[in-house]
Image (spheres, rainbow, N blue to C red):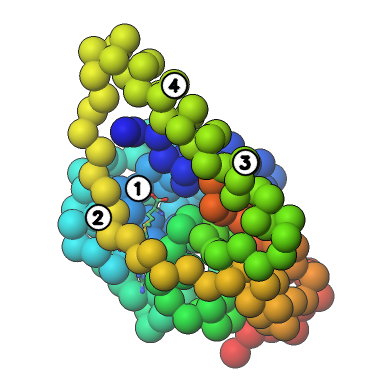
Amino acid sequence: MPFDHNHHYHPTLLRLLPPGPGRALDVGCGDGRFARKLAAAGMTVEGIDASDEMITRASAAGSPGPGTTEYRRADVTTEPLELESYAFISCLASLHHVPFETVTRLRDALAPGGVLAVLGCARPSRPSDYARELVAAPANVLARLIVFAGDQLNGGADPVAKAPVHMKFPPLNDVRRDAARLLPGSTVRPLVFWRHLLTWRKPTDHPAAG
Ligand SMILES: C[S@@+](CC[C@H](N)C(=O)[O-])C[C@H]1O[C@@H](n2cnc3c(N)ncnc32)[C@H](O)[C@@H]1O
């Protein structure tokens, strides 16, 4: 079934892009689908992923322009990232693969005024989180059926390369607590389909990293 919960939120994430062209980093870029959308929006994009297979697939897909894409195999917890240099950093369903404290490396790599956007996966913590799960289950079935039917009408879906997934999710309350501690002023918005959106804009007067 081709419906993908991460791809579903691409338009939401793209609305967070700061104006103008700039440098973007997509962490855990998988096959590069979101990185290509960033390039289509004019960004100069670097995609990093721990999987050789994903980097090979992403590189093979090229860039749609007018921006550019460049991919490298790298572990975000150790990869040297140029300080204060990215206008936009995204993590789509990848942050839970690494310790949450990794956001401090991303925070330091953001240029003043830059935006960190994390489409995260977490377990429900509050009653309202559980209520959202109840909505998600039938909505998920419906979305899959609609996409499946559409694909059948169009001659069948293209095979999708599945990125390595890690199904151990932190409780959403831990994300809320750690985001408030490490990224003061950030917001954590719960979303349907077992996702949340963590957003942080680096203040222009934020103390320089390093
Ligand atoms: C669930 S997939 C999401 C892929 C893509 N962002 C998407 O939305 O389709 C998580 C990705 O994170 C990558 N990943 C896991 N640990 C990583 C790490 N330490 N550094 C960089 N990427 C990592 C995996 O290889 C995988 O491609």
Cα–Cα span, label 3 and label 4: 17 Å
**Residue 154 image offset from top left, x and y in percent:** 30, 12
For mark 1, does the 10 Å Cα neighbourhood hold few (<14), some (14 to 19), or many (20 or more) residues? many
Cα–Cα span, label 1 and label 2: 8 Å
**Residue 209 image offset from top left, x and y in percent:** 63, 85
Image quadrant where residue 159 sits: top left
> Quick one: 72 or 126, which is closer to the camera?
126
Secondary element under disc 1, as helix, strand or loop, is loop
Q: Are marks 3 and 4 in contact (CB under 8 Å)?
A: no
Q: Is mark 3 within 8 Å of ligand 1?
A: no
Secondary element under disc 3, as helix, strand or loop, is helix
* Residue at (65, 61) in percent of width and height: 198
Residue 146's label in the rendered image is 4
Secondary element under disc 4, as helix, strand or loop, is helix
Q: What type is the residue that disc 2 sits on?
A: Met
Mark with earlier residue (1, 3): 1
The residue that mark 3 highlights is 135
Q: Are marks 1 and 2 in contact (CB under 8 Å)?
A: yes
Mark with earlier residue (4, 1): 1
Quadrant of the drawing holding the N terminus? top left
**Residue 14 image offset from top left, x and y in percent:** 59, 42
* Residue at (71, 65) in percent of width and height: 126
* Residue at (24, 55) in percent of width and height: 54
Cα–Cα span, label 3 and label 2: 32 Å
Mark with earlier residue (1, 2): 1
Between tags 4 and 2, which lies in front? 4
The residue that mark 1 highlights is 32
Between tags 4 and 1, which lies in front? 4
For mark 4, does the 10 Å Cα neighbourhood hold few (<14), some (14 to 19), or many (20 or more) residues? few
Q: Decide if residue 126 is in sight here.
A: yes
